[in-house]
Amino acid sequence: MTRPSILDEVLTSAGCSGETDPGDRPRFAVTNPATGDRLGHVPDMGRSEVHKAVRSAKVAFPVWSRKTAKERAAILRRWYELIHSRVDDLAQLLTLEQGKPFNEARGEILYGASYIEWFAEEAKRIEGDILPTTGPDRRMLVLKQPIGVVAAITPWNFPSAMISRKLAPALAAGCTVVIKPAEDTPLSALALAQLAKRAGLPDGALNVVTSVRAAETGEVLTSHPDIRKLSFTGSTRVGKLLMRQCAETVKKVSLELGGNAPFIVFEDADLDAAAAGAMLCKFRNAGQTCVSANRFYVHASVLDAFADKLAERMTALKVGQGLDEDTTVGPLINPAAIDKVEGLVDDAVAKGARARLGGGRHARGGNFFEPTVLENLDDTMEIARAEIFGPVVTLIPFEEEADAIQMANDTPYGLAAYFYTQNMARIWRVTEALEYGMVGLNESVLSGENAPFGGMKESGIGREGSKYGIEEYVEMKYLCHGGLGA
Ligand code: NAP
């Protein structure tokens, strides 16, 4: 394995280069989930470091927010270009700390960077309004201003893109940020921050808090009066907790939470397209994405044909280390993740489910799980309701369109849903009936910087990306200018 040069730069900037002990400061190890190898150490920050980071973001706020939109845009654009110039290096680092195949990691870096490019452009389009006046002696205006210091807390499954998706609109709007990445994957966050600094972001505008003390750091970030907004991506359980904590200081919140995506294959679907879509949607990141298809509802008349097409494609999957060229499915993130997926599959099989393919840990051992297809499922099984977050397909037959819609909506989640059909009237009926923030119609890869990403119900609040995304980071101020005479 070649060591990405950015790894050493990041460890040096974090004051933890190589194996040298940075003194008596607490630190924690970051490991490769495919091998268990240690990649290095980063500082384990706590309450006092978070307070320091918030202070620094507060001091930087007037400096950054008073720059013109064009100046901010130019810095973001330079950041985007720097990321592009180091894409392979960054992707290698991402694979090493997260496990996903190198090509997927590369895709994630470019995807994340596309938000920086997009919001560099959007920075120049944060426009207010002039309202028709209610009297001749007054004028009425709406200003849009950056909300202030933003806290961001992000998960490990997209260690780079989940961060750029937040930082780009926040910084474009003129906010400054304190970001707490997941403890499993802090290196990609540090790498992004380092390139941002090189691009010209002023000191204090972006502060990274690396920590294994999520509850402690989260408590400060959600209660600190100088933080005006929390943007969180992660599980619904933690999202609810943070929302409650934010209530005390009435912070604005954006929440990108868990999903439980249905993938419906109607009897009139193009089954080859549906099977190809299912592969992309289920096995990317070993099934560890919030928009992964989680429940496959397939019309009973085409279930066997669809399952055969899927199984045929699945035999081509190659489970392995992300940096091996032919790997298409990497490891799960950590031992707890593999225990969880194994537990869900074992529970289902004990209650009568059949494994059509796979069904357990992969022969490679460690954090690797076999790509699996389960059938004969019923509602008593936990897997029928849980967010699986692993490479497991659950096949559930249906007879009537209304039943498929009812089952698809029968969950507290509402992030992404997919369906395959060629019937025009059904397309509109089903699209309108699905209680989801994003719907893939004959398409299973939805996300892009120009589209609003986000969920309904317990999958979250707010949208990331698109022309709507910047609104999450601005306050509207109404100005009534009176005394102007008749
Ligand atoms: P998680 O356990 O909720 O963790 C997410 C982040 O919250 C991590 O930085 C974590 O820190 C931190 N955290 C955990 N407990 C906390 C607490 N008590 N107070 C403050 N912060 C806390 O989620 P995950 O397992 O990392 O990520 C997977 C989940 O994210 C899935 O449910 C997935 O669907 C969701 N997700 C949603 C989207 C979306 O856009 N809707 C995108 C990606 C992922 P530590 O890592 O240090 O524990």
Image (cartoon, rainbow, N blue to C red):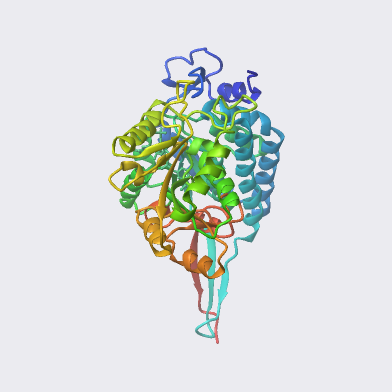
Q: In which image quadrant can residue 317 be found?
A: top right
Q: 61 or 217: which is nearer to us?
A: 217
In this figure, what is the number of numbered marks? 0
- Residue 224 visible? The answer is no
Quadrant of picture, ligand 1 = top left
Q: 74 or 395: which is nearer to us?
A: 395
In which quadrant will I find the N terminus?
top right
Q: 159 or 409: which is nearer to us?
A: 409
* Residue 377 percent location from the top left of the image: 35, 45
Q: In which image quadrant can residue 345 be found?
A: top left
* Residue 457 percent location from the top left of the image: 38, 57
**What residue is shown at x 56% (from left), y 17% (from top)?**
17
- Residue 356 visible? The answer is yes
**What residue is shown at x 61% (from left), y 25% (from top)?**
323
* Residue 137 percent location from the top left of the image: 53, 83
**34 to 458, vertically: above or below:** above
In which quadrant will I find the C terminus?
bottom right
In the rendered structure, the answer to whether residue 219 lies left or right of residue 327 reads left
**469 to 167, vertically: above or below:** below
Q: In which image quadrant can residue 50 be found?
A: top left
In the rendered structure, the answer to whether residue 204 lies left or right of residue 336 reads right
Residue closest to the far bottom: 486
**464 to 481, vertically: above or below:** above
Residue closest to the far top: 20
* Residue 449 percent location from the top left of the image: 61, 51
